[in-house]
Image (cartoon, rainbow, N blue to C red):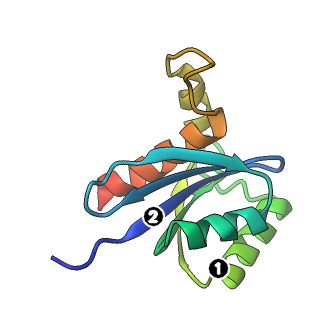
Amino acid sequence: MGSVKQYLGLDWGEKRIGLATGDSEVKLALPLKTVATLAEVLSVLQEERTDVIVLGRPQKMSGAAADNQAWLKFFSDLKERSGKAVELVDERLTSLAADALDGSDEEKAGRDEIAASLILQGYLDKL
């Protein structure tokens, strides 16, 4: 078997970016944290020794792309500044699914981190 790849899942939002980590060996996505800027994402990429970025792509319920200009700029800047492979994953309903998970507010990871872990888990499940 080849070497283990490290993945960073991203749930992008204009105010917050949820992050989750996982690898190609265990194939389990774990919520990591929420950040606010691309610079913070790039810092986490270094800390986590990420090989591949898995970014949620906004889509309409019909399946058509719902790319807004801010998301497109983030995606372009992420690819250029990270130098990493960026895989795009349909993120429809991940925030709603994150809200539906049980747990008290004190013990629960943030909505954006959970959404990022759902995005990443869907990707890892297909590996």
Q: Which residue is at a point 60% across and 85% down the rendered structure image?
A: 83
Q: Residue furthest front?
A: 47
Answer whether residue 92 is visible to the viewer in this image: no
Which of 42/114 is in front? 42
* As drawn, 75 above or below 104: below
Q: Which residue is at a point 53% across and 29% down the rendered structure image?
A: 97
* As drawn, 100 above or below 79: above
Task: Pick whichever of labels 2 and 1 is earlier in the sequence.
Answer: 2
Q: Quadrant of residue 77?
A: bottom right
Mark 1 lies on a secondary structure that is helix
Check disc 2 and give the amino acid type: Tyr
Q: Position of residue 57 (x, y in %)?
A: 62, 56
The N terminus, quarter of image: bottom left
Q: CA distance from mark 2 to mark 1?
A: 13 Å
Residue under label 2? 7
The C terminus, quarter of image: bottom left
Residue under label 1? 82
Crowd around label 1: few <14 · some 14–19 · many ≥20 (10 Å):
some
